Image (cartoon, helix red, strand yellow):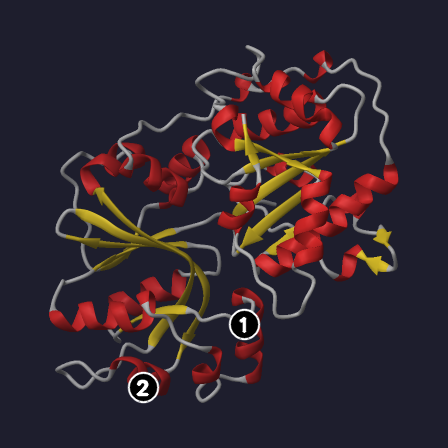
Amino acid sequence: MNKVRKIFIVVASGGQGTEKHFFDTIERKRTIEEAKRFLTDKEILILMKQYHSEPFAVWGSVPGSGNIRTWELMESGDYVLVYRSGLIIFAAEVALKIRNPNMAEYLWGKDINGLTWEYMYFLVNTERVTVEMSKLNPYLNYSSNYSPRGFMSIEQTKVNHLLNSYGDILSALTRIENGEKLEQIAVDNRLDEKMLNEKVERAPTEHTEMQWRLIRLGKKVKVDVWIPKNDQGLNYEGHEFRDEVLPEFQDTLDVPTYIKNIDVVWKYGYSIKSAFEIENSTAVYSGILRLSDLRALAPNSNYPLFIVADRSRRNKVFAELQRPTFDNPYLKLKEVISYLSYDKVRDLDEKTKKEDANISLEFLISQSEKV
């Protein structure tokens, strides 16, 4: 069953205290070592898993009947937007919520009434944005002049409409900020799989090898990795896949279930960070077809997609992406799909095998080839 995600809005006053708190615990972030002074062992384990032991962002609310009711509705995977003076200035996902007066006082002190911001929530996939509320309102079925107040949750029917129609809010905000109109998800834009009449000839060893290397690279990027259920029992050179990947996908309204069929998916929190199709077929468009179907179900997504194939198939991959079937303004595949050769994946994986080696998704993109 898909998780119903909620959207919460925090209205920031813009005062000096708010600015300082925002810098101290969202922009600058805090460490797991600091948190160990205040949290239980169980809470620390959750933070370490969610953040891959990296620094975290956190925010909180002071006690008050309205704030407490809203905070109690909050769950992991929900969205938080920060609003100020007509603009959405920040967006993120909830990783964990706790009530902890001592940690809140350590992070932010007390307000003028002696209260602490103890109704805390930890945030992942944080994004600084500048989006006029009036431009988001139509997608939520609000009037253009609607303005949020206090700490509130958006009516769930409006949230469901947005997420079902346009996909995840983080991607949607990025597109709106760039002046783009959101594409409404149109299932009839999916390609007909009957067109795929090729004979598939997999090279199981190479396919499995590439999956393993992409799993290991994902760990170096500090993301969670998903592979299809049927592949989780595989191993490569004694490395058991199931020990390194997510056992469950965490379905949500705004992430297409179809992505669970993709060869390798990188996630962080509940958000998709990247997806990889490993192409071993005689013709090369089966992987492109799967990515195009995914794209049709998430046309506003901004995460990169990759075709991973042998160097001998590079020109064929590029030629297929030029086909009118794939080259259309709805899918925009040429903008989001990049090519990685087997040799490039091997090289990147071997160079980053050391325990202290770290790479970023941006670096991986820089090593890929665009059409």
In the rendered image, the vertical position of residue 187 relative to residue 51, given as above or below:
above
Q: Position of residue 180 (x, y in %)?
A: 30, 29
Residues at marks 2 and 1, CA–CA distance in whole angstroms:
21 Å
Residue at image position (53%, 42%) is 365
Q: Is residue 65 visible?
A: no
Q: Crowding near pointer 1: few (<14 within 10 Å), some, many (20+)?
A: some
- Residue 96 percent across, percent down from the top left: 47, 67
Q: Quadrant of the N terminus?
A: top right
Q: How many marks?
A: 2
* Left/right of residue 196 with respect to residue 333 in the rendered view: right
Residue at figure coordinates x 72%, y 25% from the top left: 313
Tell me the quadrant of the picture where the C terminus can be found: top right
Q: Position of residue 143 (x, y in %)?
A: 19, 34
| Foreground tag (2 vs 1) | 1
Up the image or down, 192 lies above or below 53; here it is above
Q: Residue under label 1, please give it.
A: 53
Residue identified by numbered label 2: 106
Please name the amino acid that badge 2 sits on.
Tyr
Q: Give the residue drawn at x 48%, y 83%.
A: 33
Sooner in the amino-acid sequence: mark 2 or mark 1? 1
Mark 2 residue crowding within 10 angstroms, few (<14) / some (14–19) / many (20+)? few
